[in-house]
Image: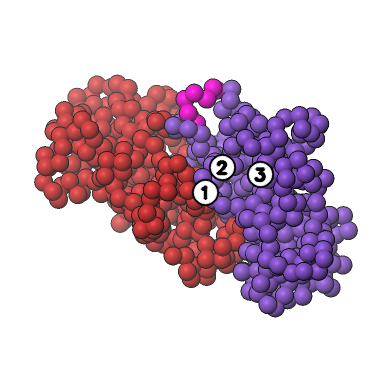
Chain colours: A red, B purple
Amino acid sequence: MFAGQSGWIGKLLDGATAELVAGADAQDDCAVFRASGPMEIVVGSDYVRGPKFQLYESGHLSNFDIGYYLATANLSDIAAMGALPIALLTVVRYPRSLSDADFAAVMAGIDAACRAVGTVNVGGDIGTAERIILSGSAVGIVEPGGALLRTGARPGDRLCVTGPTGLAASAQRYFGAAGPGAGALAAEREDELIASWRRPRALVPQGRALSASGVVTSCQDTSDGLKAGVQSLAAASGVGFVVDEEALPVAGLVAEVAALTGGDVTATVLGDSVDFQLVFTVPPDGFARLPEDLAFHEIGHATEERAVVLRRRDGTVEDLPGVPWRHEV
Amino acid sequence: MFAGQSGWIGKLLDGATAELVAGADAQDDCAVFRASGPMEIVVGSDYVRGPKFQLYESGHLSNFDIGYYLATANLSDIAAMGALPIALLTVVRYPRSLSDADFAAVMAGIDAACRAVGTVNVGGDIGTAERIILSGSAVGIVEPGGALLRTGARPGDRLCVTGPTGLAASAQRYFGAAGPGAGALAAEREDELIASWRRPRALVPQGRALSASGVVTSCQDTSDGLKAGVQSLAAASGVGFVVDEEALPVAGLVAEVAALTGGDVTATVLGDSVDFQLVFTVPPDGFARLPEDLAFHEIGHATEERAVVLRRRDGTVEDLPGVPWRHEV
């Protein structure tokens, strides 16, 4: 499944390249890239087993889906740095009860998610374990000075998000044990809802565009939820944020599931939903430098005062509702 | 525990550098390195839970020890490429029953193993799970063309190993359930035996020296055992090997444990022992280019015929004994 990947080339805007000279097909101790030209190298790891996979255990996600998810979760960290992913490494451990076909499906899902953002799975570690274990690492490259850190937001900067959040949490609520059960929504709406888990997207083009603009002062993905993302930018940058409830993008499905389950829409949008959007800050005079075709929503602004608050539609101000994602079982 | 790591600089022989500009202390989506100068980037992953940790479960390895082991297992892959490790990423998932102090000990072990080879743990993923899960990835850099692949061995090349193998397997046999039990060896010999698991070394200086020599035609570590390593070099290079039993370095402890347990010394030295030595090939006229202070043993030679065989002390030739490491539970 790894045949022919050596020779893959990642190319930065200034012509710097990373060429894969020994990929997974080489079966060496490591994969090898030949880097030429100045660049920044970014690396991150994400383990994705645990509570996130209740939907797998309940049969809503296939083996292909969890492979796809593992890859995206890791590649999203690269996107959030504004970098071009050059490598995914995956650890796939599985019980003997998993058939060869099921294992191949996990690997095919990983491969498909890599292809979706133009990168390659260069290897990792495969073997058995008492139960399925999925972990990964991703490597990216970015132009010198181009990495999007969390530290640069300044008071007055505008807070933006690339798209609506809350879909992943809504899917968990809808399909979960306490949910309304299949059929409460039309089949095609159910498919759309579960797609947030089946085919999550690592927003690599968006991250690259944000980096290339030169005006983005901080950025991260919303893999721990939008609230956690905003709080993290605040803490790292030493600022606060006012989030405007009215400005938050809300997907129709989030509202529908909230209505079905008695949930709160704003808390769902801000809470522990693993949506892989990018949340970022731009100075007011920087918007002109963002590409016209980049979709995003301005949802608030950074403040000198270091509190992170929500301004409700009625003008009242309160702490951000919603709980951030807990890395717990 | 991650304070102050940003600013760390890895420097290659030709002056190319990778400077850590956002480490684990930055708590960003990824760690960021600023690379300058041409280089090769190597990346690999290693999961180390499973049968390797019977010694942990039986109390022979501490939490510090398994952290140290996790780091070394990953850094050894970088050493085997001839590269300078610039980053370790670790996934540490643990049950709620693990105390904060025990968790801190795992992280301290990881940190100590990184320091032992002059590199840094730049982050990864930490959280709970039903049981302890340890996985890692490592990143290294090496001069252009300097990566030590498995593919370059040619008939006539000499086969070498940096040191004795079989110690890790002997420790498993000695301390295992079917072993002779504590006290069969003197306490200090027992300490020496378990040290192969407690303080394994990633042979970074040796790997760097082999790469810098320019004469090493193939290399890998013996983390799956010496037999598996030789077979892998053979398969990747399209050659065979004759291994001389008489030339195999044998540690005294391996012979002592074999005597105590009725084991076969040569099978232990070649078999599924996770020792992290480097096995490599050099053309006969290349030895003069290896540094004088590099310790290694010449144990055989590459052949045109693609079989991998052992030449016994009595001159008879047979298949290599010993079983390679199985990535199985």
Residue A218 appears in the picture as rendered? yes
- Would you name the residue on which mark 2 appears? B51
SS category of the residue bearing label 3: helix
Q: CA distance from mark 2 to mark 3?
A: 17 Å
Of all residues shown, which one is farthest toward the bottom?
B304
Q: Residue at x 39, y 24 (%)?
A: A307
Q: Say what secondary structure mark 2 lies in.
A: helix
Residue B83, picture quadrant:
bottom right
Q: Amino acid at mark 1?
A: Glu
Residue at image point 52% right, 53% down: A124
Residue B43: percent from the left, percent from the top? 58, 54
* Residue A297, placed above or below residue A305: below
The residue to which callout 3 is attached is B72
Kindly identify the residue that appears in the image at 29 percent across and 47 percent down: A61
Q: Main secondary structure of the magenta part?
A: loop
> The residue under label 3 is which amino acid type?
Thr
CA distance for labels 2 and 1: 7 Å
As drawn, the label of residue B168 is none
- Please report the bounds of the magenta region as a residue range: B94-100
Q: Is residue B97 magenta?
A: yes
Chain name for mark 3: B
Residue sitting at 57 percent across and 60 percent down?
A31
The answer to whether marks 2 and 1 mark residues whose Cβ atoms lie closer than 8 Å is yes
Q: Position of residue B294 (x, y in %)?
A: 84, 56
Q: To which residue does mark 1 refer?
A: B328
* SS category of the residue bearing label 1: loop
Number of other residues with Cα within 10 Å of mark 3, as a class: few under 14, some 14 to 19, many 20 or more: many
* Membership of A13 in magenta stretch: no
Q: Nearer the viewer, mark 3 or mark 1?
A: 1
